Image (cartoon, helix red, strand yellow):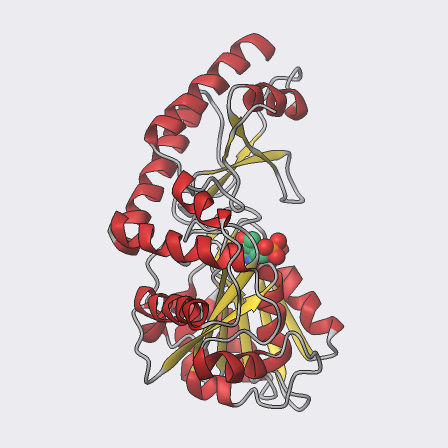
Amino acid sequence: MKEYKLLTPGPLTTTETVKKEMMFDHCTWDEDYKAITQNIRKELLELANVDEEEYTVVLMQGSGTFGVESVVTSSVGPEEKILVCSNGAYGERMAQIARQAGKNLVVYNEDYDKVPNAEKVKAILEEDAAITHVGMIHSETTSGILNDIESVGKVVKEAGKTFIVDGMSSFGGVEIDIKGIGIDFIISSANKCVQGVPGFSYIICKKDALMKCKGKCRSVSLDLYDQWVTMNKDGKWRFTSPTHVVLAFSKALEELKAEGGIPARAKRYRENNKRLIERMGAMGIRTYIDDTHQGPIITTFFYPESSKFCFEEMYEYVKERGYAIYPGKVTDADTFRIGNIGEIYLEDIDKVCDIFEEFFKTHC
Ligand SMILES: *Cc1c(COP(=O)(O)O)cnc(C)c1O
């Protein structure tokens, strides 16, 4: 098989050194391994720029969705109600999780190319006093839009509600003032901006909000509180952990630090994204999200005007030349997506744009 780099928003291209960490079969019960887990939890708190007095970290087996499901099903009690602000597939997924778990739920749907509006959230909260929790997505990977968690968080906190943020494709790659916004739970996973491989999610939890989760979850494996109780003792996971993934993630955290932490990584991603949009724009390819709200992680582009254009053909063409891109996911337009996170640099962006240029010349 020919190798290629991933221009997808996770799993993403990781370094050789991260991949190499997985060449060892680590046992799970000894002090070494538990120390690795504890160190990961400590490093994540540092990255989040929050202190141990107020916040704690829980690692949860499974992909990112398992983390979101763990938080929603563990935090919203039977007498409580969650408002989900949605402007894409991941917002809809959060709502589906709440609905299927039988939680009291209200959904505020916004168009895919617009951000959830803080004034509207405020009005919904004023109208429906039963709402106790508000959930939203930060970087909606469906479109690439970066939602305004600051302004929504402000009205959520002023109303005294619990704030849940799906920071899956932003944490580690976008600076987030978790403490300042007052986020109670923020979820991400190993294979996104920290640049590890898939296999677990992690949740940065405000301790007082986590304590209220005790006894609420109707799932054994996704119980956030129980997972924390065991893990917090000495770093032991409740059930079998993805050992290879944990080792790789630990290395990925080291490499994130060496790069200069979140500010440096965020800068690289922003520069990649800016170059990508500029060069595609020069080819006449427009973005689905406007400049103001376009996030730095992944970009949705409209198909070119040409009637000869075929996405599958372009996908194969680009893949043969070393890059895997992503189909569109928005429901109201013909689009494709290009992620610019992972072990991706300006030279990759330039290379892939040269390939697009060549493709459009010869196939459109
Ligand atoms: C990747 C992602 C998820 C999790 O998806 P999984 O397929 O379960 O890893 C959730 N929300 C957002 C915004 C994402 O980008």
Asked whether 250 or 133 is in front, the reply is 250
67 displayed left or right of 286 = right
179 displayed left or right of 126: left
The residue drawn where x is 63% and y is 44% is 330
Query: Residue 311 at x, y = what percent?
Result: 64, 25
Residue 308 lies, with reference to residue 128, above or below; the image says above
The quarter of the picture where the C terminus appears is top right
At horizontal 39% and vertical 28% (from top left) the residue drawn is 348
Q: Nearer the viewer, residue 146 or 333?
A: 146
Q: Quadrant of the N terminus?
A: top right
Instruction: Out of 111 and 216, give the one closest to the viewer.
Output: 216
Kindly identify the residue that appears in the image at 38 percent across and 38 percent down.
273
7 left or right of 172?
right
Q: Is residue 282 left or right of residue 24?
A: left
The residue furthest top is 362
Q: How many marks?
A: 0
Q: Is residue 87 visible?
A: no
Q: Position of residue 227 (x, y in %)?
A: 56, 79
Image coords of residue 142 (percent x, y): 58, 48
Q: Nearer the viewer, residue 25 or 125?
A: 25
Residue visible at 40% across and 58% down in the picture: 250
Quarter holding residue 69: bottom right
Asked if one can make out residue 207 in the rendered structure from this viewpoint, the answer is yes
The quarter of the picture where residue 2 lies is top right
50 w.r.t. 268: above or below: below
